Image (tube, rainbow, N blue to C red):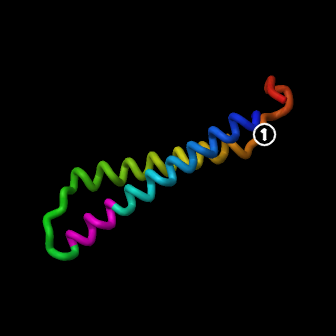
Amino acid sequence: MSVKERTKSLAKAFEEIDRAKTLLKEIESSVEFAAAGGAIDLGGLVDKTFALKDARESILVAVVEAVCQPSVGAGQK
């Protein structure tokens, strides 16, 4: 993997980390609101938790792509 491709993969990981942080803050706010007796939008909470799962998977894929070297004979050097 070239330096450029590695950099792109790691940049994607950082973008997804930022997205995950935002989602966690939103989820935390919803839970705090519910704890204070407010009505919570369960559909919205489900959507945010699924989006958080997607962000987690994207982070993992991006980091693995950036740090793993292709195997010999894979057509890349």
Residue nearest the observer in this picture, 11 or 61: 11
Residue nearest the observer in this picture, 13 or 69: 13
Looking at the picture, does residue 28 appear above or below residue 60?
below
Q: Is residue 66 magenta?
A: no
User: Horizontally, is 13 left or right of 67 in the view?
Assistant: left
Looking at the picture, does residue 26 appear above or below residue 53?
below
Looking at the picture, does residue 11 appear above or below residue 28?
above
Looking at the picture, does residue 5 appear above or below residue 16?
above
Q: Which residue is mark 1?
A: 69
- Residue at 61% across, 43% down: 62
Question: What percent of the width, then of the height, locates residue 39?
Answer: 14, 64
Q: Residue furthest top?
A: 75
Q: Residue furthest bottom?
A: 36
The quarter of the displayed image where residue 7 is located? top right
Question: What percent of the width, then of the height, locates residue 44?
Answer: 24, 52
Question: What percent of the width, then of the height, locates residue 27?
Answer: 32, 61
Badge 1 amino acid: Gln
Quarter of the image for the C terminus: give it.
Answer: top right
User: Horizontally, is 39 left or right of 23 in the view?
Assistant: left
Q: Main secondary structure of the magenta part?
A: helix
What segment carries the magenta color? 26-34
Question: What percent of the width, then of the height, locates residue 52?
Answer: 41, 52
User: Horizontally, is 22 left or right of 77 in the view?
Assistant: left
Quarter of the image for the N terminus: give it.
Answer: top right
- Residue at 51% across, 53% down: 17
Secondary structure under badge 1? loop
- Residue at 28% across, 66% down: 29
The quarter of the displayed image where residue 65 is located? top right
- Residue at 33% across, 66% down: 28
User: Horizontally, is 37 left or right of 29 in the view?
Assistant: left
Residue nearest the observer in this picture, 24 or 72: 24
Mark 1 burial class by Cα count in 10 Å: few <14, some 14-19, many 20+: few
